[in-house]
Image (cartoon, rainbow, N blue to C red):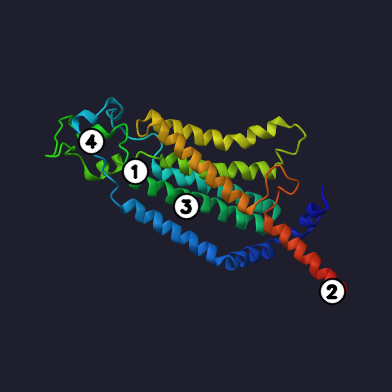
Amino acid sequence: MSSSSKVYMMNMSDGQFGANSYVLKLVRRHRHDWLTLLLLGVIDGLLNLIEPFHRYLSEEMLTPDIKYPYQHDTIPMWSVPIYAYLFPILLFLLYYYVRRDPHDLHYAVLGVLYSGLITGVITDAIKDAVGRPRPNFFFRCFPEGLTAFKKNGDVLCNGDPKIIKEGYKSFPSGHSSWSFAGLGFLGLYLSGKIRAFDRRGHAAKLCIVLLPYLLAALVAVSRVDDYWHHWTDVFSGGLLGLVVSTICYLLLFPFPHTINCWAPHAYFIMLEESASSSRDEEV
């Protein structure tokens, strides 16, 4: 164990009350970050209220790739925040309960929420701008299978307006991007905590790290199986979530293969500032 790890262990053994109060101090110190997070949530909510771009679809453009049956999705949207964000946060709280590390709890929660909301804003903004029809668009537009067209040749949908609106939001997949954003952050977090890349060759650690990614991948596959997305939608959404989660994680935590991968950057900055203050007092 490194000397900084030993100092870390001693500092985190001061008691629950001190650790909890320090979490609140960190929240106050980063109040602008938390307010920005709230703003991102409002923006994402507004993006969901906007009517997406309606692509022109003539009778000849109603190809078989958008004529799949319309059915309920296997994994509803309301469940995504539960497994992709609430579950990781519960693990962060469990680690906090064991180690009493206020820095880790604060930056892990802040990071995973930023990862999710940044991904959500990007995803929904692109959805609204692109307006790509879903694979089941035809039966969203024409529930009875009877087609109708405007004078300009564009489709004249007669289905539920809310269902039709969602039918123009195929690219990219929100389930995929949100899942890889939250669970991808969790995968990086776990790799740092268990030191998966410590060069000692413990391949079993890699299995633990890859579990969140496997869950996210299965969610993405379900979107194609349910005919809610084309494969390019889920591939792009998954890639988007991976990129954003990696950026958010590395903003707050070291690379998982480094020696100090077990704690956030802020902790080591605090150690350096404490050591510098001690030297100044001695002088």
Q: Secondary structure at mark 1?
A: helix
Residue at mark 3: 117
Q: Residue at x 48, y 52 (%)?
A: 118
Q: Nearer the viewer, residue 33 or 65?
A: 65
Dot 1 amino acid type: Val
Visible in this render: residue 14? no
Measured from the top left, where is residue 96 in percent x and y? 65, 53
Q: In the displayed structure, does residue 204 sit left or right of residue 5?
A: left
Residue 245's spot in the image, x, y percent? 55, 46
Mark pair 4, 3: CA separation: 32 Å
Residue position for label 1: 130
Residue 113, numbered circle:
none
Of labels 4 and 2, earlier in sequence is 4
| Residue type marked 3 | Leu
Which mark, by number, is residue 281? 2
Q: Nearer the viewer, mark 4 or mark 3?
A: 4
Name the foreground residue: 5 vs 278: 278
